[in-house]
Amino acid sequence: MSPLLDARGLAKRYGTTPVFEGVDLQLERGELVALLGESGSGKSTLLNCLAGLDELDAGRVLLDGIELTTLDEGRRALLRRAKLGFVFQAFHVLPHLTVADNIALPLLLLRRPDPLRVAEMLGAVGLEGLGARMPRQLSGGQLQRVAIARALVHRPLLVLADEPTGNLDPRHAQQVLDLLLAQVREQGSACLLVTHSERAAARADRCLRLGEQGLT
Ligand SMILES: Nc1ncnc2c1ncn2[C@@H]1O[C@H](COP(=O)(O)OP(=O)(O)OP(=O)(O)O)[C@@H](O)[C@H]1O
């Protein structure tokens, strides 16, 4: 079977400054891969490019056999909605929606509303009882867990997670890693996890490093 994510020859620059080039990356179903690298090495940019949120300068990305790089923005958005869960470094929780409505959003966009699943995800990230709150009433670590619940609620095939445990204490970090691993193992998804945490990296199936030599 072909890899779930098959990215080849990726290159990205901002202006004339290259961020990365010659990047090849394959993710198999059922695996969690940690993406390491110094601050500024281009990890977030790579995630955005893999998701089609940022344009590549070269290379191609196949997700579940579909070539993302040749799709127009509308089709790319539909594919993202159906197959991708993205945990942004800055969370991007919508401030005017309750916690529960933020988590429910991917299901609503897919026309598959499922309040039980939303409640299950609230519990899975340790936010039971906080569904009716507004995001401004949450701590940074709680907001991060809302972002994780929202990224996983629709059981996406590919999870791209940008430092999803960066603001969490060890217990909640472990809970989030358990959840990501469960998604990957039970649903046959794949997860690319950007992290600076050795603990998180230790739980990955493989570790890759983005640096001057590309992805190694
Ligand atoms: N929109 C942009 N325009 C110009 N340069 C950018 C832009 N976004 C990112 N960069 C630059 O690209 C490089 C890679 O940034 P990126 O955020 O991908 O790094 P990172 O490895 O995720 O860092 P961190 O670990 O600090 O989150 C950095 O030098 C950054 O300054």
Image (tube, rainbow, N blue to C red):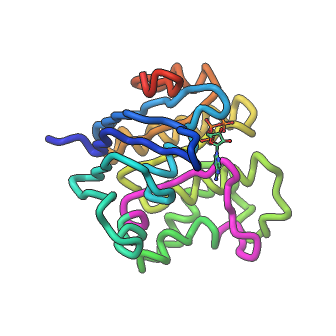
From the viewer's perspective, is 51 left or right of 71? Answer: right
Quarter occupied by residue 27: top left
Residue at screen point 46% across, 51% down: 49
Report if residue 85 lies within the magenta region.
Answer: yes
**Which one is in front, 128 or 55?**
55
- Where residue 24 sits in the image (x, y, percent)? 34, 34
In depth, the one of 35 and 59 nearer the eye is 59
Which residue is found at the position 27% from the left and 51% from the top?
62
The image shows residue 8 at horizontal and vertical percentages of 30, 40
Residue visible at 69% across and 63% down in the picture: 93
Q: Count of labels shown?
A: 0
Q: Which residues are magenta?
A: 80-100
Q: Which residue is outermost to the front?
A: 16
Q: Position of residue 25 (x, y in %)?
A: 35, 35
Residue 39 image offset from top left, x and y in percent: 67, 31
Quarter of the image with the N terminus in it: top left
Whether 20 is drawn above or below 143: the answer is above
Residue 201 falls within the magenta-colored stretch: no
User: Could you tell me which residue is drawn at 42 percent across and 21 percent down?
Assistant: 216
Residue at the farthest bottom position: 111
Query: From the viewer's perspective, is 99 left or right of 185?
Result: right
